[in-house]
Amino acid sequence: MTSTPLRWRIIVSSLLAVAAVYFLIPVYWLVLAATKDTTGLFGSNGFWLADPHPIRYLRMVLSYDNGIYLRWIANSLLYAGVGALAATLLSSAAGYALAKFRFPGRETVFNIVLAGVLIPATALALPLYLLFNKVGLTNSYAAVLIPSMVSPFGVYLCRIYATAAVPDGLLEAARIDGAGELAIFRRIVLRVMTPALVTVFLFQFVGIWNNFFLPLVMLSDQKLYPVTLGLTSWHGYTDRAPILYQLTVGGALLSVIPLMILMVVLQRHWRTGLTQGSLKD
Amino acid sequence: MRRHRNLAVLALLGPFCLLFAGCFLAPIGYAIYQSLLKVERSGPLGLGGDKSVFAGFANYSAALRDSEFTGSVLRVLLFGVVQVPLMIVLSVVLALLLESASARWVPFFRSAFFLPHGVPGVIASILWGFLYVPGISPIVRLLDGAGLQVDFLSSGTVLWSIANIVTWQFAGYNMLIVISQLKAVPIELYEAARIDGTNAWQLARYLKLPMARPAIVLTTVFSIIGTLQLFSEPLVLRPLTVAINDTYTPNLNAYTQAFVNNSYNLAAAEAVLLALVACLLSFGFLRLVGRQGDE
């Protein structure tokens, strides 16, 4: 490691510090704002403390309207957790089949799935609502869960990963030992593909957690809302009920803390295999 | 044995394909079908009930003649032409800075830049909305104190205020993808360059930047698709300013047509047009960079 001139180190560090201020200032504001009530929000300096009561105000968030906020959080966890888990399993099975089996139409299937990556999700949500409406599926957990289980990008990643990481010799050996195809998938392939599965799960989890358009279109019952939709509904009523200003701010802080921790702790997995496919082309 | 394998493929691939058909292919087909219909009301004053009849491309020509819709498409295109390059350049510069030998506290900075991606788009918009509104915003107050009267929500500035929200959310994420690409470069390449006496600037410009190309292409395509879908940011900011109407972006327009005006057929045509533009732009971009890569 050659040492770099001090001048360069200072310039690089200053640039990085300026960027850090830009990315962190809204978070800093949010943390302080959550300790204030509506009067404090409007009346005090946003970059400084003023009569902080974080616990009391966060309790108000949790108890408002019979604790609807906690229900929204639970819904978000359900949508994102179950949806991402199902999407990961389905993607890994499909990606493995597309990578390791030869069958007619394989490339056609893969190309159609790949085109699915480029279709804007919001362009699908509207016709999907009309379809679900026909079969009476709208305004239910299934209306958000079912579309969340499909991840064309996950299939793409899993195929690339399986092609590179699952050795044919291992599969052949297992077949000679008399193992069934599904048993091979369950016991061997899933294990080898774990790094890719973590990446797909994270992608899908965050994608569903952040999704807003689909639940907005599908759901009308507040009790089914994910937290994004719930907070937006509070935000929309602030004109009529000023207390909702402070509840929106507190609720926003509570909802982003777990995901921010998740993102930072699991940063490593956002890399694995993400661009391996494009590297090979 | 062959049959056995085919059954396995069916079992592995079948469930995904079924859901993919239901949640991707069927909605596209249904949107195209709906976009070719129109609702005709019969009886006196249109009270005799509704009936869907074939309308050809009437909805498409209506959408294309609607200046609100074409205006919204042009607006997001303008947004994309400015915001996407700016954000990608910022992401690449941050990645190169973090990967340079002069950087310190790399894990801290990387986390700080990536953190905003953990904030959902609507929450980010609510958050920045508070930072834009005079009265709450400490930023407006600071600028005011410095003698600068800035209105982040005027008709001239609000599009760029939205661009800021999107950049804030996605720059760190794109940076991470570029970094992962740079990490995949064999270490011997760097060693060789260093022995040749390459300085940090040359290393970044002639070795790392070309190496990061696939990641830059990937993030650009996803950013283009994301731009066309702009929805939650203008929806959340709309109550705060008169500069945003309910047809501000194509998605907001389609949503308004479907759920406010109950014109599902027109909304379907707009959704199809939007998907077409997205595909054209991303394929066009991929072809463009593909051709440059061959040279």
Image: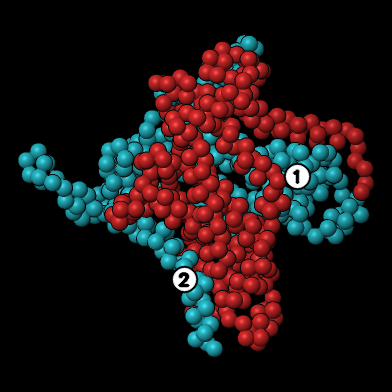
Q: Is residue B70 left or right of residue A251?
A: left
Letter of the chain in red:
A
Q: Is residue B240 left or right of residue B101?
A: left
In which quadrant of the rendered image does the N terminus of chain B lie?
bottom right
Q: Position of residue B204 (x, y in %)?
A: 78, 47
User: Residue B47 or B257: which is nearer the viewer?
Assistant: B47
**Which secondary structure lies at badge 1?**
helix
Q: Position of residue A214 (x, y in %)?
A: 43, 46
Query: Residue A172 falls in which quadrant of the image?
Result: bottom right
User: Residue B37 or B86: which is nearer the viewer?
Assistant: B37
Question: Which residue: 36% across, 60% down?
Answer: B26
In which quadrant of the rendered image does the C terminus of chain B lie?
bottom right
The hue used for chain B is cyan
Callout 2 environment at 10 Å: few (<14), some (14 to 19), or many (20+)?
A: some
Residue type at mark 2 is Gly
Residue type at mark 1 is Leu
User: Residue A6 or A90: which is nearer the viewer?
Assistant: A90
Residue identifier under label 1: B96
User: Residue A31 or B213: which is nearer the viewer?
Assistant: A31
Q: Nearer the viewer, mark 2 or mark 1?
A: 2
Q: Is residue B212 left or right of residue B258?
A: right
Q: Is residue B34 left or right of residue A15?
A: left
Callout 1 environment at 10 Å: few (<14), some (14 to 19), or many (20+)?
A: many
Separation (CA) of disc 2 from disc 1: 43 Å
Q: Are marks 2 and 1 on the same chain?
A: yes
| Residue B117 seen in the current view | no
| Residue B39 seen in the current view | yes
Residue identifier under label 2: B14
Q: Position of residue A201 (x, y in %)?
A: 59, 55
Which chain is indicated by disc 2?
B
